[in-house]
Amino acid sequence: MHAIKLFFMIAISIANLVPMLAQGADKQSAPDQIILDVTSKIMGIVADADEYFNVDPERYFEEIDEALSDLVDWRGFARGVMGPYGSQQYYRGLDKDGQRRLREQLNRFTLQLRHGLIRSYAKGLLAFGGANMEVSGMEPSPENKRLASVIQLVYGEASRTYTIRYQMGKYKDGIWRLRNLIIENINLGEIYQKQFVALAEDFNGDIDRVIDDWNSLLPDKKVEMK
């Protein structure tokens, strides 16, 4: 799969996971039911954006961000992307000043990652043009009842069908949130983690520089897939 197709597929995938909390949905909904219920709502945001995006793009980005705010575990995802630089083992090995600095770095990277993903995928949604999708099932984790994968089929061009796995976790507040995405055999979290570690090595361990430059450097690190 070419990188740009993967880009759009991820955009459509994340959009389908918008929570219905603002609309009064049951917070205890199963993860597959969440996906079934919200697809049309996020597509409504995209459809409405055609009327105002050119004059007020920030309104569109804010609506997409607000829709995703309660569902995606942004901090957990950011920590995973940081890999060894955000692990508990690494944190425990630091002195108090180092731990404080790492917490600040994680907070800052969470904002950077969220900002870049929201804008990139929101634009991708406008360009994608829609797709036919169906939820084909849910697979509870055999090891942890608070983890599950939702499988969705997306029908693309030339009768091509893509399989998307939403890796979900049930948090202490009882709400299922998105932890990671796997499209075909492409693990989004793993790809971003490899990119973060590679940049850290390029910058001689300067994590602050990686964070500051993340959104400007990430497009150059995209992987071509067939």
Image: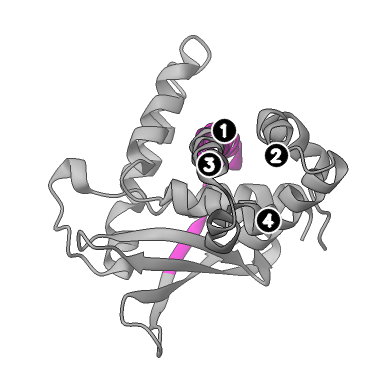
Structural distance between the alpha carbons of marks 3 and 1: 10 Å
Q: Residue furthest bottom?
A: 142
Circles 3 and 1 in contact, beta carbons < 8 Å: no
Residue occupying the point 49% across, 18% down: 57
Q: Position of residue 117 (x, y in %)?
A: 56, 39
Residue at the disc numbered 4: 193
Question: Amino acid type of disc 3?
Answer: Leu
Residue stretch in magenta:
110-134
Is residue 98 at all visible to an observer of this figure? yes
Q: Residues within 10 Å of mark 1 (few under 14, many from 20)?
A: some
Give the residue at x 34% y 50%.
71
Among the two numbered marks 3 and 4 on one chain, the one whose residue lies closer to the N terminus: 3
User: Who comes first in sequence, dot 1 or dot 2?
Assistant: 1
Q: Is residue 114 highlighted in magenta?
A: yes
Residue where numbered disc 3 is placed:
106
Label 3 SS: helix
Q: Report the Cα–Cα distance between label 1 and label 2.
A: 13 Å
Residue 65 in percent (x, y) is at 41, 34
Query: What residue is shown with label 2?
Result: 207
Q: CA distance from mark 4 to mark 2?
A: 13 Å
Query: Viewer-nearest of labels 3 and 1?
Result: 3
